[in-house]
Image (spheres, rainbow, N blue to C red):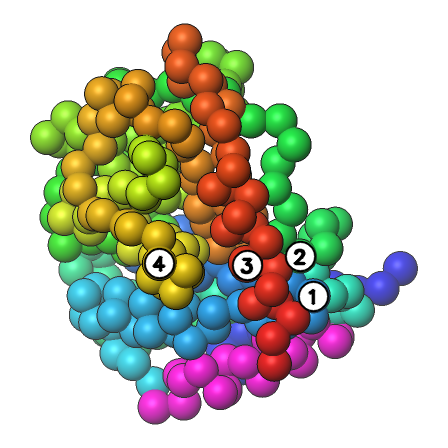
Amino acid sequence: MLDTHCIYNGHLISIYEPAVTFSNRAFRYGDSIFESIRVANGKIMFLKDHITRLKLGMTVMRMNLPAEFNTENIEALIKLLLVKNHLGRDARVRLTVFRNEGGFYTPETNDISFLIEAESLESEGYVLNQKGLWLDIYTDMKKQLNKLCNLKHGNALFYVMAGLAKTSMKLDDCLLINENGTICEAISSNIFVVKNGALYTPPLNEGCVDGIMRKQIMRLATTHKILAFEMPITINSLMNGDELFLTNAIKGVEWVGQYKNKFYTNRMAAFFTDKLNELTRQE
């Protein structure tokens, strides 16, 4: 059986080699930030955007940024890991940065360590779901609006609770609401509503994660002269929409088939999936 490897602070190690201690701050306090990165058709997708977002998040969380922490170095480490783990042309990569141990709630240092993991994906490129998702709104908790709400940080209990609710309600996903009562995102995705050929998505001040795929969809919309608006999304927005789709860096686009008694089509979701796959084939 082949050993599986990860990269810890730039060094290739076995995943069975102890590297993270019980006093790790990501484990104790969720004091971490991460990126989920897609490799599609052998290409590391949107890595520059991922590293830019990661650096911004580290700045917000007052983590020290090492000089060697740049797109070129991270790309080389990811490629090394993909080869070492004999992964195919499609994979999921997770890059986690955590503050070094020491202190209780108040850290003793702002220096960081990082971990890169990778696993294979069965799909070739981005594949649109054949059956539309069935979803509803998670109402037990609301997402707080603060300087952390746009980040992908390790303190994810809000999303865990929404995931438990999704399972108990036998749904494919849940939409999340912020403290203003408007819809900001899904459990691990951004949300787009399509009405009369135009896109509508919550702005960042509504509390959604600053999604990498969200950014690509907005770019593609501009390129193909599709109107795109950032505005608060309400239940009325859902009920009046022609389409509803979710986006994240790994899956690309997922179309929603049903919310309550409202049914949706998927023409725009299919269009963007095709355009994303075109990007995987570009040099």
Residue at position x 26%, y 78% in the image: 64
Kind of residue indicated by mark 3: Leu
Which of the 4 image quadrants contains residue 246? top left
Q: As drawn, is 174 to the left or to the right of 146? A: right
| Disc assigned to residue 225 | 4
Residue 219: horizontal and vertical position, in percent?
Answer: 36, 63
Residue 59: horizontal and vertical position, in percent?
Answer: 21, 71
Residue at position x 41%, y 84% in the image: 70
Mark 4 vs mark 3, foreground winner is 4
| Disc assigned to residue 41 | 1
Residue closest to the eye, 193 or 61 = 193
| Disc assigned to residue 276 | 3
Cβ–Cβ under 8 Å for marks 2 and 1: yes
Mark 2 vs mark 3, foreground winner is 3
Task: Name the chief secondary structure element in magenta.
Answer: helix
Residue beneath disc 2: 125
Residue at position x 89%, y 59% in the image: 1
Which comes sooner in the sequence, label 2 or label 3? 2
Which comes sooner in the sequence, label 4 or label 1? 1
Which comes sooner in the sequence, label 4 or label 2? 2
Kind of residue indicated by mark 4: Lys
Stretch of the chain drawn in magenta: 67-84
Which comes sooner in the sequence, label 1 or label 3? 1
Mark 4 vs mark 2, foreground winner is 4
Mark 4 vs mark 1, foreground winner is 4
Residue 205: horizontal and vertical position, in percent?
Answer: 14, 48
